[in-house]
Image: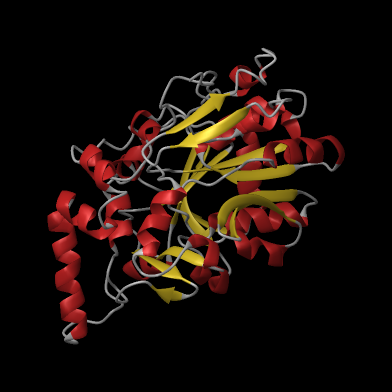
Amino acid sequence: MTTVCELNKCAGCMACVDICPKRAIKIKDSLSTYNAVIDEKKCIRCNACHKVCQVNHPARAKAPINWHQGWIENLEMREECSSGGAATAISKEFLENGGIVCGCTFNEGKFIFEFANDKDDLKKFIGSKYVKSDPTGIYKKIKDRLKCAGKVLFIGLPCQVAALKNFIGTDLSDKLYTIDLICHGTPSPRVLDIFLKQYGLTLSALKDIKFRVKAKFQIYGDYKEIITKGVSDRYSIAFLNALTYTENCYSCPYAKTKRVSDVTLGDSWGSELAIDEQKKGISLILSQTEKGNELLKMANLHLEAVDIEKAIANNHQLEYPSFRPTGRDKFFAGIKDRKFNSLVFQQLPKQCLRQDVKKILIKLQIIGGGVN
């Protein structure tokens, strides 16, 4: 098997798929790993895939020049967003200043990238997605837009931002603005589908999916919780404990303070601001470039100072990748034959039992279903 980058290091950025003139590359998803596999019969040895690959050629990373925490001034929009709504605030003003925004959305059972041409269209980007997205096709579209339609703002994971920069090159880079999202790691969407099938659901049948509401981590399918409201399901538990990520995530080169984008966004976990503000959602906001500063200045954001050491301590992905759990191999060895929930319990019994106790307390009405 000939792969574009080192075996099992593929992040699934899909840039190699987009750039191949002969469609000779397919992503092999084994649940625990991604690999970009080259069909030798179709390959013409142009080397384009190797050059665009962000594993082989990581984008230049820069230290943040500004650190903030804050939120969108519009309270209604803030309530709709997972965190403080910083991405929505920046996107809204970018559109109003004549640009186009590209982000990840859930459409027809897939997590794909689309453009938003007006502020109402931005709603499809709202919400955290704790699963691998598929940028296939978007790199070419962004490059075409940059050539003829002016500025583009891309919002994605650090590996996707790096891939896009490689794909675009330097000639069009002045018109490209980028936001990367602080990333724990990402599972294959097939892992999510296996979890959902326990409840008679599939990604392809869902019209909408949510992974969290503010600090409450729980999957909602078509606007309804999968299990008891206020209780983290096994998919969320596995994700938060890094059990289900693809292999590359545990050696992610972008999990560090230096970033590859103009702006980096995440949650301001551990904030010292008022509890009421924390419940509404607070974004952690880093700016690495003058373009990043430009985005923040134009956005309708309430900005506060942030303790840098505390911000890093509560977002370890700004310092190092997630650790590979010792039980990960056993989990994936049994995932095709055993129930997802039982496998997660086997590897993370304490975390699961804590949620099981919470479920009982909610049913007995000792606590409410809105607790964290």
Question: Can you give x and y, in whole percent of width and height, for residue 247 in the image?
Answer: 36, 33
Farthest residue, direction bottom: 365
Residue 320 as seen in the image, left or right of residue 285: left
Question: Is residue 199 at all visible to an observer of this figure?
Answer: yes
Question: Can you give x and y, in whole percent of width and height, for residue 171 in the image?
Answer: 77, 24
Question: Can you give x and y, in whole percent of width and height, for residue 10 in the image?
Answer: 47, 29
Farthest residue, direction top: 45
Tell me what residue is drawn at x 55 percent, y 61 percent: 126
Front position in the image: 168 or 274: 168
Identify the coloring.
secondary structure
Tell me what residue is drawn at x 13 percent, y 56 percent: 349
Residue 271 as seen in the image, left or right of residue 106: left
Task: Using the image, determine if residue 86 lies above or below residue 64.
Answer: below
Tell me what residue is drawn at x 29 percent, y 64 percent: 233
Task: Using the image, determine if residue 66 lies above or below residue 269.
Answer: above
Which quadrant would residue 31 be assigned to in this image? Answer: top left
Front position in the image: 39 or 52: 39
Residue 53 as seen in the image, left or right of residue 209: right
Question: Is residue 288 at all visible to an observer of this figure?
Answer: no
